[in-house]
Each structure stands twice: as structure tokens, then as C-alpha cells.
Image (cartoon, helix red, strand yellow):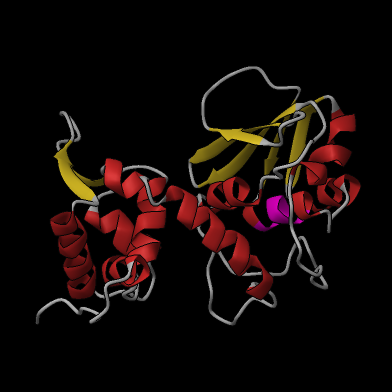
Amino acid sequence: MGEFRYPQFCALARAAEIVGERWTLLIVRDLSLGPLRFSDLRRRLSGVSSSVLSERLTQLERRGLLERRVLEPPAASTVYELTQMGRALQPALVELMRWGTRFMLPPRLGEHLEPIWVLAAVQALARRSSTPACTIELRIPDGEQSHVVRVSGGRHGTRVTREAGPSDLVVTAEPMTALALIAGWLSPDEAVASGRMQAQGDLALLAKLPQLFEIDWEAPADPAGAGPSN
């Protein structure tokens, strides 16, 4: 089957031809968080068939948005990663995620939340105006590992990075609890009481965490416990 084309001389039409098919933007989202094997993508993208995933990856590779790379031994696995052209989609992904937050609640039955997706949410929801001057390290457990992101406030807005460095406060929280904390739905005391959060450092900064982000969602009935499964 040939690739779909719009009969329009329009940049948006061209972009839609490349990333508008089902699953494509979600593949780009996951690869924007780091290289992945085919099996990793298939596991995260619950509901996609192997044939459709293979077709989408082939299309993106042919378009120059991703490439394959063989890892050094002992891994020796083939991974997919974004090219420079693929990474250039990041600002558009961020804007789409910011826009999409207004449609997030309530969660739908059967949805799941990958812990690493919280990192994408943190990047997308970072406040762009002046924020409290502090650096908070957020750790999201995922099996035997944790996904780590550092959030720094300042006069030019919130900066989000995955680079290592000093932090004023380290927060370890499960995915939905982390989202509830940054949204301000859940107080630090409630988060600790729920057993889904631990914090080390300047605990007074916990109250400033929501000020580092821009979220326009109504709080769910149970911020710490409600939501999709991991």
C-alpha cells in the first residue's frame, strides 16, 4: 500500500502525511525519551500489532526521522533512535501535550501509564514564566530502575533536564502521585501518608513544586490512587 498524500501544497499537510497516522506520534514520543528496541516499543505501546509497528518504524526511517543502531556487546541489540530531524519534532510534541492535558480526565477504563511518560509530562508542563529559584530531583520508580529528571526554577521559567547535578530536594514518587504533586492536587503530607512518596532534602520546597508547572486540570476524586495502571 502506498503512503497517503494530501493533494495540497501546505506545510501542515506535509507534516500530517508524515506523523498523522495512528501510533506514529506515540512512537516519536517514546523515542524522544531514549533509544528503544522493537520489543520495548511494542510493550509500551499496548494495543499496537507487530505488523503495524514495523510498518510505522519503516515509514519513519524512510522519511529520515529515525535510524537503527546496534549496541555494543554484551547487549548487541538493535535499537531505534531519533535522528536530528526526528528530534526537531520535540517542540511540536510539547505543544500537543500541553494542549492535550485539558482532555486527560477522567482516565478511561483500561488505560495504562508508563512511568517514563511522567518525564515527558514534566517537560511539557514546565512553567514558562518566572518560578521559585530551586532545584528538585524527581525520581519515578519503574521496576528495578528509576527514571530521574531535575527541575530547576528561575526568573526565565522552569528548566527540565535529565543531566546529573546537585539538587535542593529529591522526591521519589509513583507516577500518578508525581502528577498529583506537580498539579497541586495532593499535599505533601497526604502523599507521604499514602506511602507513594519519599523526600530527602529541604522539605519546605515540596510546597513550591506545583509553582514550577502549568496545569489546568480539575483534581480527580482520589489524586494519589485514581488513574491508569502502570
Q: Residue at 73% across / 47% down in the picture?
A: 213
208 left or right of 153 in image: right
Q: Inspect this view and state whether residue 77 appears.
A: no
Q: How many marks?
A: 0
100 left or right of 219 in image: left
Q: Nearer the viewer, residue 124 or 176?
A: 124
Q: Residue at 52% across / 40% down in the picture?
A: 147
From the top left corner, tell me how far across and down residue 157 is, in percent: 71, 36
40 left or right of 158 in image: left
Q: Inspect this view and state whether residue 192 appears.
A: yes
Q: Residue at 37% across / 46% down in the picture?
A: 88
Q: Nearer the viewer, residue 142 or 126?
A: 126
Q: Residue at 81% across / 67% down in the picture?
A: 219
From the top left corner, tell me how far across and down residue 175 is, in percent: 63, 54
Vertical relation: 99 (above or below) 210: below
Is the stretch drawn in magenta largely helix, strand or loop? helix
From the top left corner, tell me how far across and down residue 156 is, in percent: 71, 32
From the top left corner, tell me how far across and down residue 23 is, in percent: 34, 70
207 left or right of 182 in image: right
| Residue 55: quarter of image | bottom left
Q: Quadrant of the N terminus?
A: bottom left
* Region rendered in magenta: 176-180
| Residue 133: quarter of image | top right
Vertical relation: 73 (above or below) 190: above
Q: Quadrant of the C terminus?
A: bottom right
The verdict on residue 71 being magenta is no
Residue occupying the far front of the picture: 9
